[in-house]
Structure formats: C-alpha cells, structure tokens
Image (cartoon, grey):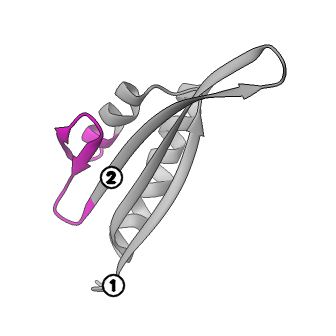
C-alpha cells in the first residue's frame, strides 16, 4: 500500500445528495455530517447544485471530492461512479 494522499473531484448528474451519501456509507464510510463521509483510508466531501440542461431541463449535480491514499481511491471511485450512474438513469 502506498502512503501518498490524493484528492479526486468528480461530478454526477441526476443523483441526490442523500443518495450519494448513502452509497458512500454502503462502501464503508461513516456519515459524519450531511456533506461529509469518512472511512479509515478515505474521506469524501459532497455538495450539490441545480444545473440547466438545455432551455427547459434542470438536474441536480452532486460534486464529490474524494480524499485518501491512492490505493483506496483506485477502488472506491469506480465503485461509487458505477452506483451513481445507475441512479442517474
């Protein structure tokens, strides 16, 4: 395992902040605040905003800032992304 700490930021459309937090908890984290989930080797900060898609459609876009060691994030980010993409339909 490497000791390098990294940060990765990703945005997901069509998923709620609540559902994103729930997915991170299912992936081994503990919700320590509405916008923060932490585990031993990683943490994630969440924020949400409404974005316009074309002239009449608006979606929620959740931004997740993942922090942790490289090895932990290499497994976590793709697993979370897969869950988030299924939710966004």
| Segment tinted magenta in the rendering | 24-42
Q: Which quarter shows the C terminus?
A: top right
Q: Is residue 15 above or below residue 11?
A: above
The residue most toward the top is: 56
Residue 35 within the magenta-colored segment of the rendering: yes
In front: 30, or 34?
34
Sooner in the amino-acid sequence: mark 1 or mark 2? 1
Q: Which residue is mark 1?
A: 4
Give me the C-alpha separation between circle 1 and circle 2: 16 Å
In-image side of 49 versus 32 (left or right): right
**Residue appearing at x 39%, y 74% in the figure:** 6
Number of other residues with Cα within 10 Å of mark 1, as a class: few under 14, some 14 to 19, many 20 or more: few
Residue 20 screen position, x and y as percent: 40, 34
Verify CB contact (< 8 Å) between mark 1 and mark 2.
Answer: no
Q: Which quarter shows the N terminus?
A: bottom left
Label 1: element kind: loop
Give residue 17's mark: none
Residue 60 screen position, x and y as percent: 56, 26
Number of other residues with Cα within 10 Å of mark 2, as a class: few under 14, some 14 to 19, many 20 or more: many
Residue 55 screen position, x and y as percent: 84, 18
The residue most toward the right is: 55
**Residue appearing at x 31%, y 31% in the figure:** 22
In-image side of 34 versus 32 (left or right): right
**Residue appearing at x 54%, y 52% in the figure:** 10
Give residue 44's mark: 2
């Amino acid at each position: 395992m490497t000791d390098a700490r990294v940060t990765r930021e990703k945005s997901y459309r069509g998923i709620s902040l609540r559902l994103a937090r729930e997915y991170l908890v299912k992936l081994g984290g503990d919700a320590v605040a509405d916008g923060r989930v932490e585990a031993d080797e990683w943490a994630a900060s969440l924020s949400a905003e409404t974005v316009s898609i074309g002239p009449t459609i608006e979606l929620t876009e959740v931004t997740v800032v993942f922090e942790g060691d490289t090895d932990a994030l290499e497994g976590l980010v793709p697993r979370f992304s897969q869950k988030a993409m299924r939710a966004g339909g």
